[in-house]
């Protein structure tokens, strides 16, 4: 429904696009802890939007940001009861649809989690595998690192930073004449 009268976007011709996403959620007792779509054993989970999956939310925002789409909170309002407890993979799929309609595929993803507990190291491989699966990427194109919040005073929160690189699909025959929807 976008107007064709707008000036043609130079960005639509880009071979590569970068995206960045950030998110944080507070730990709460008695709810499951989901990070990167994987349920981790821990007495506290992450509250707030949907299932509180801080890593999938930051990843979704990174993908949306790479194609300058509205962010996760604009597309899926946290005040809409429809999203309470929702599987965050739903948001990720919407972001993937948008980057594909814009003519891009995901090249690779890197991420850093900042949280006091639980230790992510032993779960990193499972999280990487799950994200690789969600994005249809090889596992070596998905980085998941974790740090503890030294001196930040955010011991009761989990924070995620994610960067993504998108590559133009079949660049050889891409024609910048036609704007994506
Ligand atoms: Zn979130």
Image (tube, grey):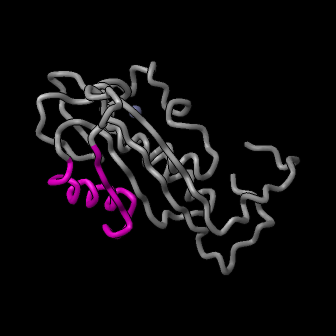
Question: Is residue 128 one of those drawn in magenta?
Answer: yes
Specify whether 148 is left or right of 169.
left
Between 59 and 158, the one lying in front of the other is: 158
Residue 169 picture location, percent across and down: 59, 70
Quadrant occupied by the N terminus? top right
On screen, residue 160 versus residue 129, left or right, reads right
Dominant secondary structure of the residues highlighted in magenta in the image: helix
Q: Quadrant of ligand 1?
A: top left
State the residue at coordinates (29%, 46%): 147
Across and down, in percent, residue 54 comes to 35, 38
| Residue depicted at 38% across the width and 32% down the height | 24
- Indicate the quadrant where residue 32 lies: top left
Q: Which residues are magenta?
A: 120-147
Q: Residue at x 32, y 41 (%)?
A: 114
Residue 3, position as x, y percentages in the image: 81, 44
Residue drawn at x 87%, y 51% is 7
Left or right: residue 7 versus residue 99 is right
| Residue situated in front as seen by the camera: 132 or 83 | 132
Q: Position of residue 123 (x, y in %)?
A: 18, 52
Count of numbered tags: 0
């Amino acid at each position: 429904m976008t107007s064709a009268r707008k000036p043609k976007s130079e960005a639509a011709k880009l071979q590569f696009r970068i995206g960045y996403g950030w998110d944080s959620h507070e730990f709460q007792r008695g709810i499951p802890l989901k990070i990167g779509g994987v349920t981790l054993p821990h007495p506290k989970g992450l509250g707030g939007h949907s299932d509180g999956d801080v890593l999938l939310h930051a990843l979704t925002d990174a993908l949306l940001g790479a194609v300058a789409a509205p962010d996760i909170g604009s597309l899926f309002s946290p005040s809409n009861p429809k999203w309470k407890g929702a599987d965050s993979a739903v948001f990720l799929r919407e972001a993937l649809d948008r980057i594909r309609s814009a003519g891009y595929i995901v090249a690779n993803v890197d991420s850093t989690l900042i949280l006091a507990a639980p230790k992510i190291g032993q779960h990193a491989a499972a999280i990487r595998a799950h994200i690789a699966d969600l994005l249809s990427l090889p596992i070596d194109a998905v980085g998941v690192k974790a740090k503890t919040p030294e001196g930040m005073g955010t011991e009761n929160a989990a924070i995620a930073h994610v960067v993504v690189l998108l590559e133009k699909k079949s660049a050889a025959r891409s024609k910048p004449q036609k704007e994506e929807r």
